[in-house]
Image: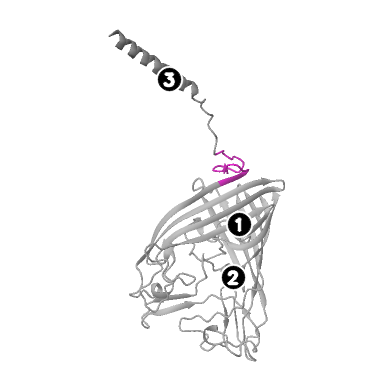
Amino acid sequence: MIKARTLILGSAAGLIALSGAQAADLPVKAKAVEYVRICSLYGAGFFYIPGTDTCIKLGGYLRADVTFNGGAHGAPAWNSDLGQQNRFRDYFVGRSRMALTVDTRTATEYGVVRTFGQGDFQFNNFGSSNPTTLSAFPGGLANALSTAGGGYVAVEFLFIQFAGFTFGKSASAYATPWQGFPGNINSSLLGGQNTDTGVNNIQYTAEFGNGVSGSIGLDDPTVWDRTAVYNLSIPSAIGANGTGSNAYAGTHAPDIVGRIRVDQAWGLFQVSAAAHEISGSYNTLGAGGAPTNLSEISGHPETKWGGAVMAALQIKNIPTGAGDDIKIDASYAKGATKYVIATSGTSPSFAMFGDSGFGYQSVGFGATTDGVYMPGPAGTGGIALTSA
């Protein structure tokens, strides 16, 4: 019994000694590493990219919407099967979107360099049951949007800012902060200039103090700022749908835009101006505006410059409630119709169908053009610019 007790006590002592040795070998608990540091230099939401002096902010939103008797995101039923209200039209269309924004700021010896990008990951149904209607993703990937597991990424803004300059895809210097439509809700309302998803440009903004600033820029007009130029000599120049074949020449010059803005506690006032080049392709064209063997030797109309002006006013904090305001803008254009009739896509040529009692599917037309021309001695003498 004595031997057993001695063995047990000896074992316990050995365990205590072993535990003590292990405890002595444990390292001191390291101080927590601050992997993410808050960057308060540029407002809420920024943090330092680890190992750099660059601050970054991630943002975005999720949106799901359904439009009844219209196009995606509230587009009106102003043409095609929707406009005709026939049996091929979809009674509703849905769209789901996730927007992701990445905003960075880097302090340099010559000022802060900013980069900003926004991508929209979305799916919406652009399919059609009408066998005569083209149902294809822009770029030729047939039905890419409406297939199971389909969808695409749309690029809104991608730009760099430095020392007052902006390079890349951003809102035009001509634009108002509300971009031609109220509350950023529906970009299919017509009226005013609109580059709310960005246009390739170069611009410079000077701050004069007390909320007064001036901006000047060069905008690529190819996507946002051109409607159509009609050559009225084309066979059946104005088709059965009331519109003609686009005879615009290639893009030769950027739009020159500028604004003066006063933005203070009471509200905002802005005056904008733009110069826009209008050019036709050839005097002789085939059906649909396609070139023929005689096109290049037929000559072309002389290029003209048109433009647009806009005045905009915002009155903040009106008596109806905190945060309420009134926004209004008025535009005039000659040869630059997109600056007056603008949506977030191509300005539509309207084909509004109805039932007037005079005939089946009576229709009203409204073509949007920057100019028209009729070659020849009895013609227009060049491009006649459209006023809007």
Q: Which residues are magenta?
A: 36-56
Is tag 3's residue or tag 1's residue first in the polypeptide sequence? 3
Chain-order first, disc 3 or disc 2: 3
x, y percent for residue 149: 39, 62
Image location of residue 367, percent across then percent down: 51, 77
Bin the neighbour count of mark 3 within 10 Å (Cα to Cα): few under 14, some 14-19, many 20 and up. Answer: few
Q: Secondary structure at mark 1?
A: strand
- Is residue 246 in the magenta section? no
2 or 1: tag closer to the N-terminus: 1
Distance from Cα at disc 3 to Cα at disc 1: 64 Å
Residue underneath mark 2:
222
At mark 3, the secondary structure is helix
Which residue of the protein is positioned furthest toward the bottom in this rendering?
Answer: 377
Name the residue at the top extreme: 2
- Residue 293: give x, y in percent of width and height: 59, 90
Residue holding disc 3: 18
Q: Which residue is mark 1?
A: 159
User: Disc 2 marks which amino acid?
Assistant: Thr
Task: Estimate the spatial distance between the alpha carbons at disc 2 and disc 1, rounded to whole Å.
Answer: 18 Å
Foreground mark, 2 or 1, reads 1
State left or right for residue 216 relative to residue 197.
right
Tell me whether the residue at label 3 lies in contact with that at label 1, contact meaning CB atoms closer than 8 angstroms. Answer: no
Q: Amino acid at mark 1?
A: Phe
Residue at 48% of width from left, 84% of height from top?
239
Foreground residue among 369 and 101:
101
Q: CA distance from mark 3 to mark 2?
A: 80 Å
User: Residue at coordinates 61% horizontally, 90% vertically from top-left?
Assistant: 294
* Image quadrant assignment for residue 161: bottom right
Query: x, y percentage for residue 186?
Result: 47, 60
